[in-house]
Image (cartoon, rainbow, N blue to C red):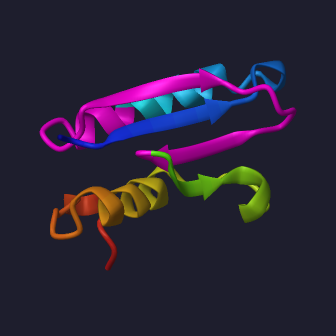
């Protein structure tokens, strides 16, 4: 079965649109490699975390802030399909 990406976000922080944008990017990039992207309103203030099959890949608090979508795609790719090329977004 293909992996599922979960984006947990703080609705009180107004991060739903950011989460939705990232979901769109992930669905476009990993179309053939994922089952779904879940948007999950968080219950912890300030939460913004991304996981693949319940394995944490990115946490805004632990990271000290947000990172670029390019870097997030690289982190997800490394979990989902390490051999996959991200084209112009890939590491140089």
Where residue 89 appears, as percent x and y from the top left, is: 31, 60
Vertical placement of 46 versus 17: above or below?
A: below
Quadrant in the picture for residue 53: top left
Say which of 7 and 21 sits in front: 7
Say which of 14 and 83 sits in front: 83
Residue 90 lies within the magenta run: no
Say which of 43 and 23 sits in front: 43
Q: Is residue 31 visible?
A: yes
Where residue 58 appears, as percent x and y from the top left, is: 58, 56
Residue furthest to the left in view is 32
Q: Residue at the location (24% across, 32% down)?
A: 35
The residue range painted magenta reads: 25-53
Question: Position of 18 compared to 26: left or right?
Answer: right
Quadrant in the picture for residue 33: top left
Where residue 27 appears, as percent x and y from the top left, is: 29, 32
Q: Residue at the location (76% across, 21% down)?
A: 14
């Amino acid at each position: 079965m293909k992996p599922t990406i979960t984006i947990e976000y703080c609705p009180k922080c107004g991060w739903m649109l950011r989460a939705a944008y990232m979901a769109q990017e992930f669905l476009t990039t990993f179309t053939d490699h994922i089952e779904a992207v879940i948007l999950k309103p968080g219950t912890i203030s300030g939460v913004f975390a991304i996981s693949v099959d319940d394995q944490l890949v990115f946490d805004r608090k632990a990271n000290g802030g947000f990172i670029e979508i390019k870097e997030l795609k690289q982190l997800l790719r490394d979990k989902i399909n390490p051999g996959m090329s991200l084209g112009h977004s890939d590491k140089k």
